[in-house]
Amino acid sequence: MNGFGCLYNCSLPLPMPVKAAHSSSITLLYNGSKFKGTQKSKGSSSDVEVTILNASLESHSLCGQLSLQGPSMDLAMTTYFEGELVGQRHSFLTHKWDVDDEVDRRHWSKFPAFAEHLQSAFEADTLDYAALEDSDFVFMRWKERFSISNCSASNVSFAGFYYICFQKSTGHIDGYYYHRGSEMFQTLSLNHVSLRSSGIYEPM
């Protein structure tokens, strides 16, 4: 989100986490899953909370809401976003949203999991996208679509998107916001919120 605005109510069931089809760990990308952390740019840090509203790992997609509150904001700005999971359906090359291949390379290479294990195969065009499903890391793009909060601001833009790297074993998310007219490499750092902290039973 670049900037800090239709009221939207989404009521979805919140199922317990399920075993990932290609992982021995429990996937934390389930309906109702929450993540909290910060988005940082030069000289500024904003609190961020993300809720996954619907996740379909089979179709390599998800959607959710992202709430951001900066130091000068009285109310949080909440937006609806759609996510693409990189894999056999969506490649590392974006091919839309005013992004060229070099921008993709520069952002994905910021993630150590990509730079250390995938970049050489990506550059050689020999990357096995099917094998990504067995990885501890899930790479995604999150694209905000519209505001779902009562907060409004004139400088809100939905032109950009986030490059995302989610680690299954830790529940941690790293990300970078990109829009060609915005500050480069604004960072997103989120940790999964345990269901226990919300008063909901989470199985071991």
Image (cartoon, grey):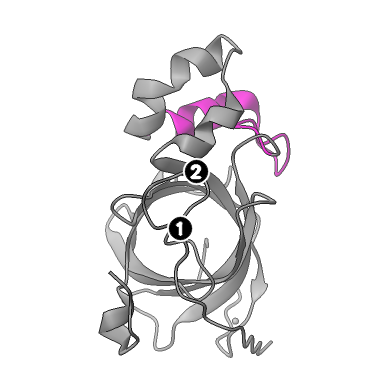
Extent of the magenta region: 90-110
Whether 145 is drawn above or below 87: the answer is: below
Task: Give the amino acid at mark 1.
Answer: Lys
**Where residue 143 sits in the image (x, y, percent)?**
62, 56
- Nearest the viewer among 65 and 199 is 199
Q: Quadrant of the C terminus?
A: bottom left
Q: Please give the name of the residue rendered at 33% of the width and 31% of the height, measured from the top-left corner.
A: 112
SS for dot 1: loop
Q: Can residue 22 be seen by looking at this rendering?
A: yes
The image position of residue 142, as x and y in percent, is: 57, 54
In percent of the image, x 32 and y 74: which residue is there?
A: 203
Residue 25: x percent and y percent? 36, 51
Q: Is residue 63 above or below residue 111?
A: below
Classed neighbour count for the residue bearing mark 1: other residues with Cα under 10 Å, few (<14), some (14–19), many (≥20): few
Q: Which residue is mark 1?
A: 19
Q: Say the numbered circle drawn on residue 107.
A: none
User: In x, y percent, where is residue 23?
Assistant: 43, 45
Residue 186: within the magenta?
no
Q: Furthest residue to the top?
A: 124
Relative vertical location of residue 2 with respect to residue 69 in this rendering, above or below: above
Judge whether residue 92 is colored magenta. yes
Magenta stretch secondary structure, dominant: loop
Name the secondary structure under disc 2: loop
Residue at 61% x, 13% y: name it: 125
What kind of residue is marked 2? His
Q: Is residue 103 visible?
A: no
Residue 99 lies left or right of residue 48; in this view the side is right
Local packing at callout 2 (Cα closer than 10 Å; few below 14, some 14-19, many 20+) is few
Can you tell which quarter of the image residue 10 is in? bottom right
Q: Are marks 2 and 1 in contact (CB under 8 Å)?
A: no
Cα distance in 3D space between marks 2 and 1: 9 Å
Q: Which residue is mark 2?
A: 22
